[in-house]
Image (tube, helix red, strand yellow):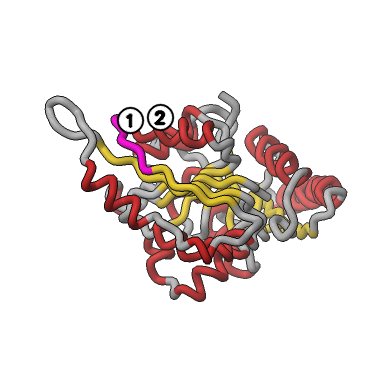
Amino acid sequence: MFKRALISTDLSDGLYRLVNSVPALAQSGLEQIVFNHCVALEGIIPKADNEKIEWAKSRLSVLRPNIPDSLEVKGEVVPSVKPHETILDVAKKHHSDVIIMGANIHTFMDEQVFGSTSRSLAEHTEIPIMVLRPQLISTYTSEELNLRCRYLFRYLMLTYDGSPSAQYLLKRVKDYAQNRPANSLEKVLLVWVVEEGSRREYKDVNYELEKANTELQKVKEDLSNLDLEVEIEVRQGEIIPQIFESALMHDISAIAVSSSRKNKILEWSSPSISNKILRRSWHPILYFSPSH
C-alpha cells in the first residue's frame, strides 16, 4: 500500500526493534524506510546533547547485510525543539507516504493514544499515520514481529457508514490502492454497524440493515475494480463493541479511520467513533488526516 515509510520513535515505544525487521518490512511492499528520533535541545541556551545523539544513532543502526537490494534504509537522528515540526520536515525531505509512530501510554490512564507530538503532526499533514501500541510491540518475539511487519498493510478494516468521514476514508484508501506495490494491500473488510435504539421500531431497523447492505455492495464493487478482495459485514448493536468483535473474528492487519474535519478526532471530549477506536483498540490504527 505504501512505498516510503518514516518510522519515528522516542526509543521507549518499542519501535526501535523494527531495525531488526527490515527484511520483513521490505516484504510488505516498502521501498524506503527512514528511522527517525528527535533529540530534545536542552539548557538555558538550547544545544544538542552529542552523547544522546550518538546513543540514538547506535540504537537505530541497521546491519548492512540485513538490507535487501530492493530497499533503501536511512537514519535521521535530529536535534529538535518542536518534534512534530522536525518529523514533518524529515517526512517531506524523504517524500514519505506513511508515518509510523508508537502510541502514547503515559497519559489519560493509558487511553490517550495520540500524544502531543502525534496530535500536532496530524494537524499539519495529510500523510497517513499508523499508530502501534508499545504494549503490543514489546510482547512479540523476533519471529512474531517479523511476521507482523510482513503483513503490516495486507488486510485493512474500514468502518463505513456513508458519512462524509467514511467517504473521505474510502477515497484515501482507493488513492493509495491504485498505485500500491506488490505484496502490500490485498484485502479490505467493510463494516457497517446499525445501532439499536429502544424507541426504534423493528421495521425501521430492518430498513437500515437493508440500506447498509445495499450501499456496502456498491462500495465493494468499486474497490473490487482495484483488484482487491473485499468482504462486507453489516452488524447490529453498539458500534464500538461490534467493531472490535468483527476485528477479532477477521484476520485483519489494521483498522483504518479518519474524521470529517480537521482535528476533530483529536479532541478528546468529542464522541467521535474514530476517537473511541483510537483510544481502545489494540490493533494497529491507520489514521488518515482530513484535508488541511
- Residue bearing the label numbered 1: 82
Q: Nearer the viewer, residue 140 or 281?
A: 140
Q: Residue at x 64, y 47 (%)?
A: 3
Total marks placed: 2
Position of the C terminus by quadrant: top right
Three-letter amino acid code at disc 1?
Lys
Q: Nearer the viewer, residue 27 or 249?
A: 27
Classify 243 as above or below 101. Answer: below
Tell whether 207 sits left or right of 86.
Answer: right
User: Where residue 259 sits: x, y (%)?
Assistant: 57, 36
Outermost residue, left side: 44
Residue 78 is one of the magenta-drawn residues: yes
Tell me the number on the disc at residue 49.
none
Q: Residue at x 87, y 49 (%)?
A: 225
Q: Nearer the viewer, residue 289 or 264?
A: 289
The secondary structure making up most of the magenta span is strand
How far is disc 1 from disc 2 in space, using C-alphas?
6 Å
Tell me the number on the disc at residue 85.
2
Residue range in magenta is: 77-82
Check whether the beta carbons of the residues at disc 1 and disc 2 lie within 8 A of each other: yes
User: Where residue 217 sits: x, y (%)?
Assistant: 83, 51
User: Where residue 251 sits: x, y (%)?
Assistant: 64, 68
Residue 273 visible somewhere in the drawing: no
* Mark 2 Cα-neighbour bin, 10 Å: few <14, some 14–19, many ≥20: some
* Mark 1 Cα-neighbour bin, 10 Å: few <14, some 14–19, many ≥20: some
Q: Nearer the viewer, residue 204 or 279?
A: 279
Classify 177 as above or below 123. Answer: below
User: Where residue 112 sits: x, y (%)?
Assistant: 36, 47
Q: Residue at x 47, y 39 (%)?
A: 271
Q: Residue at x 69, y 43 (%)?
A: 173
Three-letter amino acid code at disc 2?
Glu
